[in-house]
Amino acid sequence: MAESQIGTVDHFFSNISVSMIKLTDVLKVGDNIIIRGKSAELAHSVDSMQINRTPAQEGKAGDIVSLKVAQKVKPGDAVFKVS
């Protein structure tokens, strides 16, 4: 499986387990990602995402998308798309 970095975690809301990710490449619903940091590694399938609190099917470079995640991530963690 090939991995390519597509962004970084910008913020994490622990009370609702949502990560804000600043994208440097395209991310679509249905993609598989890995969030990798110093304290954790999380494999995740993108089931849904939001941009500015609006449901979206795709985010592009420069967008900040919101994703519900299964565990805590930290700002600065790298986000990779798995293909």
Image (tube, rainbow, N blue to C red):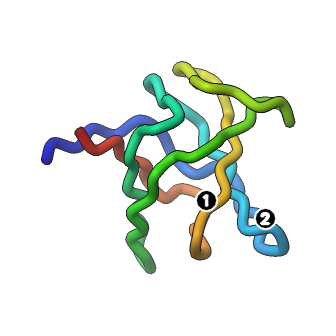
- Give the residue pinned by disc 1: 75
Q: Residue at x 72, y 68 (%)?
A: 17
Side of 22 relative to 2 (left or right):
right
Of the numbered discs 2 and 1, the one sitting upstream in the chain is 2
Quadrant of the rendering where the C terminus is positioned: top left
- What's the amino acid at mark 1? Pro
> Quick check: 79 left or right of 4?
right
Helix, strand or loop at mark 1: loop
Q: Is residue 9 left or right of residue 15?
A: left
Q: Residues within 10 Å of mark 2 (few under 14, many from 20)?
A: some
In the rendered image of this protein, does residue 7 appear above or below residue 18? above
Give residue 6's position: percent from left, percent from top. 41, 35
* Residue 46 x/y as whole percent: 52, 46
- Tell me if mark 1 has few (under 14), some (14-19) or many (20+) residues whose alpha carbon lies within 10 angstroms of its own: some
Q: Nearer the viewer, residue 48 or 77?
A: 48
When the figure is inspected, residue 2 is found, relative to residue 43, above or below; the finding is above
Residue at position x 43%, y 76% in the image: 40
**Residue located beneath label 2 in the image:** 13
Q: Secondary structure at mark 2?
A: strand
